[in-house]
Amino acid sequence: MWAKGAGGMGFDEGQGIAVDTSGNSHFLGWFEGSATFGIGWINGM
């Protein structure tokens, strides 16, 4: 079991999660402004 944080300084919303046949997790959602997902910051639209 593991947990990972993600998100930005504005509003964040997760909308879905799925696991594929290889066991990879996929997350769907959106954020305002900039957000970090573990390796650095990205800017939203």
Image (cartoon, rainbow, N blue to C red):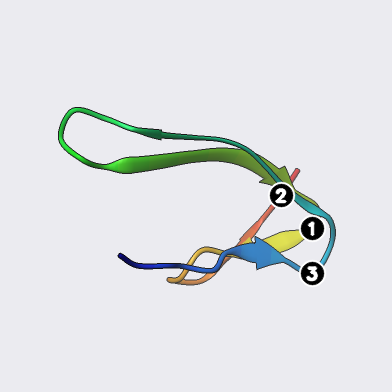
Q: Position of residue 10 (x, y in %)?
A: 84, 62
Q: What amino acid type should be assigned to the residue bearing mark 2?
A: Gly
Work out how far the residue at label 2 is from the one at label 3, CA to CA, in angstroms: 11 Å
Element assignment for label 1: loop
Work out how far the residue at label 3 is from the one at label 1, CA to CA, in angstroms: 7 Å
Q: In the visual, does 31 lie left or right of 7?
A: right
Binning the other alpha carbons within 10 Å of mark 1 as few (below 14), some (14 to 19) or many (20 upward) gives some
- Which residue lies most toward the left here? 22
Res 9 label: 3
**Residue drawn 34% across and 43% down?**
25
Res 17 label: none
Contact? badges 3 and 1 (CB < 8 Å): yes
Res 44 label: 2
Contact? badges 1 and 2 (CB < 8 Å): yes
Q: Quadrant of residue 7?
A: bottom right
Between disc 1 and disc 2, whose residue precedes?
1
Q: What amino acid type should be assigned to the residue bearing mark 3?
A: Met
**Residue drawn 72% across and 65% down?**
8
Binning the other alpha carbons within 10 Å of mark 2 as few (below 14), some (14 to 19) or many (20 upward) gives few
Between disc 2 and disc 3, whose residue precedes?
3
**Residue drawn 57% across and 64% down?**
6
